[in-house]
Amino acid sequence: MVTVVHDNIEQTEAKMSARDVSVFYGSKKAIDEVSIDIPTEYVTAFIGPSGCGKSTFLRTLNRMNDTIPSARVEGDITLDGQDIYSPKLDVVQLRARVGMVFQKPNPFPKSIYDNIAYGPKIHGLAEGKDQLDDIVEKSLKRAGLWEEVKDRLQDSGTALSGGQQQRLCIARAIAVDPEVILMDEPCSALDPIATAKIEELIAELSGRFAIVIVTHSMQQAARVSQRTAFFHLGKMVEYGRTSDIFTNPHEKRTQDYITGRYG
Amino acid sequence: MSPIILLLLALGLGLAGWLAARARAWAFRRESPDGRLSSLPTYHAWYVALWIVIPVALFIVVWSAIAPGLVTQSVLASPAAADLPAFGFQRQTILNEARAVATGAARAVFNPQAQELVEPYRDALSRFNLIGIAVTVLIAFVGGTWAFLRLKPDFAARNRVERIVMAILLAASLVAILTTIGILASLVFETVRFFGMVSPIDFLFGTFWGPDPMSSADNPDGSRYGAIPLFWGTIFIGAIIAMIVAIPLGMMSAIYLTQYADPKVRAWVKPALEILAGVPTVVYGYFAALTIAPAIRDLALQAGVSNPSSESALAAGLVMGVMIIPFVSSMADDSIAAVPGAMRDGSLAMGATQSETIKKVMIPAALPGIVAGVMLAVSRAIGETMIVVMAASTAANLSANPLEAMTTVTVQIVAMLTGEGSFDHPATLSAFALGFVLFMVTLALNFIALRVVKRFREAYE
């Protein structure tokens, strides 16, 4: 079955684009020929039932699947027209440009300051202590966490609440000034208030970074994204404006999923 | 022989009680209107069986301790024992001989006097065996009947059985603790005796070690009991040289095994490394004494050291370090593997390389476990004896030169206990003081290790 792509989406310049991407775990095909363009201007949401491959596909975009020995990727994925699976590409550089936030907040067992300074240090972004301080402050401000933690930057990042930890992880990701931020169900471990804060933050960050968010919650996709792709059984079934996907899906499977028939 | 028979008897009675109680519980169940009991019939059965077996087992323990004494008492009371030598060694030999013949362990006696005692012994043994069996049955019967009579349809047998099981488990865990306390008590007793003869100041701060077991025990020369050279040798060999070898190698192998190794390689290398931990230390001792120590001496000769010793702290320390590698590596391996995969993914997703991830995230997160592993390895190394005996000699030597012969606390404990001095000579007693110091140091290391692990355990949860 071919993916249905709505024809009313504007042709914007794609930050990342995937063409006929398939992912295998051993001999099992987890993703089947997915093609999609990801623009900088919008937040793109991947929705679909558990096990549909949306997270797997997300992880191919910054090559995090490399850490799974049995995983194999076919097809082309480009970042600004450059093939990210080319042997010439340095995966370290790629991940600096395509950051990631995980399902469960995973701050390092270091101080809040060191959590943020980690990326800038390994990528050599700061020339001295002052510049590093600036980056830390700027990243925490952008992530809306500065007011809450500015007086205790030396406390452990793991001592924060779950929602604060997740915003710390977002701050950590934006500290290296990426072009794309991938979020893998960033609110699934958080309570509604913390979730609302993260969603606000996503809205603030959108436009500056291309944001791709995987989510289980259709309401969340509707709230935060402008583009939505529906995945089912390893295939991308439908892709279009979020408002169209939720009000006027072209595919029966999409409609069944968003009306709660399965999932 | 006799306690085993009594135990089998108790188990048989317990089984009978078990079956009877279960049958009774089933009968309750049939009679009760709703066919339910407050506990399952097996719990009633176990309740009665435990009330039979545990009191009997306690009796057997006590009985097997006092029965031989009672037998001897009754033999001595017999007329045949009247003309035995009054006290001491001879009397004991005769009694032992008679006993051996009476129980069938020996066929005949050398000593004619013992021959007369065989019959009384046989009588006493069979009499006390019968008493033992009778008391066993009596206790089993009383315990079993008491428990059996308490059975009722609404009797909470399950809760009681659970409580008894908990008590048994508690007793099992107390054995280890009580043993530790017992060891400590015996050490303390002898140590206090030693410090009554030699001042603790001389012992702990003196720099010359050379106890003379042949000297007068009444007025020992405190200046010959300075244990500093031993402490230094122990630290130098066990905590410095061995750790310089073991920490880097153990850490690197743990990092390789957890982070880089192919699962197939890991499946081979990890067990191989753990086999190292099972090699008897005396085998390492051979290796140290026959291969490493001469090699070090030859190297020292070539390097221009005049007249190097054929036994050296370096040889013992190096081999001990190799021996300790599996301890460090397996603790480090476990704690690195226990760092959540999310930490690693988080770091890799920031664009860190694998080695940056290991150095800056994995190892700091695993540090408590690694530190604990190193502490345990140190306490293992300073308690090691064989390698040092074979490769580093018994000469107490206060020196920072690793090529010199040195000795450690454990080696001197062996030397003093197996020496020629009498048991109450300060030279012999010094072994207990040394053991006490060693015990306290390793206890402190283990304590610190546990505290470190506990304090930082939840750092990434």
Image (cartoon, rainbow, N blue to C red):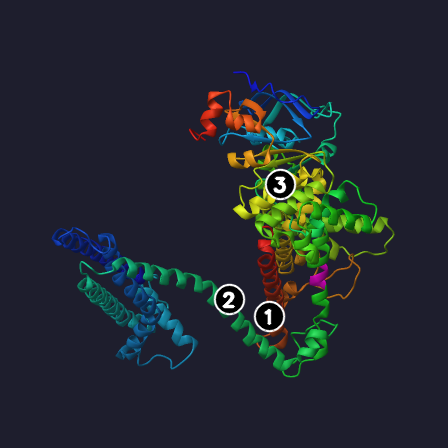
* Residue B236 included in the magenta stretch of the image: yes
The mark found on residue B436 in the picture is 1
Of callouts 2 and 3, the N-terminal one: 2
Residue B274 drawn above or below residue B433: above
Q: Residue B99: x percent and y percent?
A: 33, 68
**SS assignment at label 2:** helix
Q: Residue A244: x percent and y percent?
A: 55, 25
- Identity of the residue furthest to the bottom in this view: B219
Of callouts 2 and 1, the N-terminal one: 2
Query: What's the magenta bit mostly, secondary-structure-wise?
Result: helix
Please identify, in this view, whether the residue under mark 2 or under mark 1 is nearer the observer. Answer: 2
**SS assignment at label 3:** helix
Tell me the subunit letter for badge 1.
Answer: B
- Span of residues in magenta: B233-237
- On screen, residue B453 versus residue B106, left or right, reads right
Q: Is residue A260 visible?
A: yes
Disc 2 marks a residue whose amino acid type is Thr
- Which residue matches tag 3? B258
Q: How packed is label 2: few (under 14 Cα within 10 Å), some, or many (20 or more)?
A: few
Tell me the subunit letter for badge 3.
Answer: B
Q: Residue A96: x percent and y percent?
A: 72, 36
- Which residue matches tag 2? B180
Q: CA distance from mark 2 to mark 3?
A: 36 Å
Q: Residue B353's quadrant in the figure?
A: top right
Q: Is residue A111 visible?
A: no
* In the foreground, B266 or B185: B266
Q: CA distance from mark 2 to mark 1?
A: 12 Å
* In the foreground, A85 or B239: A85
Q: How packed is label 1: few (under 14 Cα within 10 Å), some, or many (20 or more)?
A: many
Of callouts 3 and 1, the N-terminal one: 3
Residue A109 drawn above or below residue A124: below
